[in-house]
Image: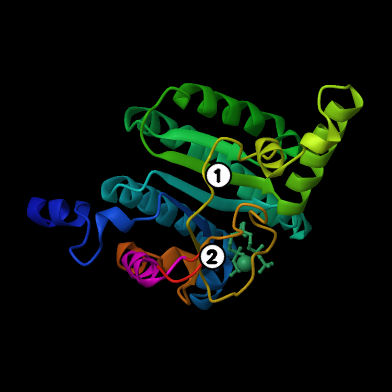
Amino acid sequence: MTTTKQTALKELPSDLRRDRLPQHVAVIMDGNGRWATRRGLPRSVGHRQGVETLKQLLRCCDDWGIQALTAYAFSTENWTRPLEEVEFLMTLFERVLRQELDEMVREDVRIRFVGRLTDLPKNLQSMIENAMSATRHNQGIQFTIAKNYGGRQELVQACQAIAQKVQQGDLNTADIDEAVVAEHLYTAGTCDPDLLIRTSGEMRLSNFLLWQTAYAELYIADTLWPDFDRAEFHRALFSYQQRDRRFGGLKR
Ligand code: IPE
Ligand code: IPE
Ligand code: MG
């Protein structure tokens, strides 16, 4: 690829408006298994290819000026898959973190993990802690990875934490409002996603960010995750920019 073409790719496509970009994009990366099966390959190849797609999307968000990207990597329900696949996914994750951390530190990415991390393998937990602390002071794009994440589980743990504060006399029941709930979610401190993309044509949330997506714009792509490239993302952003976000009010 020539340098000119590379530079052109980095620029926001001319039919997209910078002032109407989503601040925060969330993705349900679905379809890795089908992508591989259609090629007669083991599902693991699809997962590996899916990591490449995620790396490209992170770079694209950074190039085009999107401030936050959240990716659903493993749900609380994904433990029900065959042990071999679960173990492959955990190991793949460790490998990717090991290989990519230095570059993400250099590129000023702030990494965050959301989910019930204490149930993950111990090595992975310490790598996750290391990645978060190594990038804590970075000022660039916020990259959140949802790992062992379930929206309902997140709400349950928030209820428990809030109830405990009430029990200890640190919080009055009457003072529990939406802001208090949001502060007790794993995503505390991050703005809600403006755009939620799901690949592989499935039209469901699969327990992802149930609270935070209350007013997200939804975009379903038929493309399987490993094929979700810059052109596909461009289409999703273009669609987003055509929407009229009313938030329950009247047309702007
Ligand atoms: C998404 O791809 C990745 C994870 C859930 C870990 P899938 O593994 O769900 O792929 P399909 O949906 O079976 O094709
Ligand atoms: C959602 O995909 C979870 C992730 C992408 C990590 P799934 O493939 O697990 O969702 P379902 O089973 O189709 O709802
Ligand atoms: Mg799937």
* Nearer the camera: disc 2 or disc 1: 1
Looking at the image, which is closer to me, 25 or 35?
25
- Residue type for callout 2: Asn
Q: Mark 2 points at which residue?
A: 32
**Mark pair 2, 1: CA separation:** 17 Å
Numbered circle sitting on residue 145: 1
Q: Residue at x 65, y 57 (%)?
A: 208
Q: Callout 1: few (<14), some (14-19), or many (20+) C-alpha neighbours within 10 Å?
A: many
Percent x, y for residue 103? 36, 33
Q: Relative to residue 203, is residue 217 drawn left or right?
A: left
Q: In the rendered view, would you say 206 is above or below 87?
A: below
Element at label 2: helix
Could you tell me if residue 198 is visible in this image? no
Quarter assignment of residue 137: top left
Q: In the rendered view, would you say 116 is above or below 128?
A: below
| Magenta span of residues | 234-245
Question: Sequence-wise, which precedes: disc 2 or disc 1?
Answer: 2
Percent x, y for residue 155? 76, 47
Q: Relative to residue 2, is residue 213 drawn left or right?
A: right
Numbered circle sitting on residue 30: none
- Residue type for callout 1: Ile
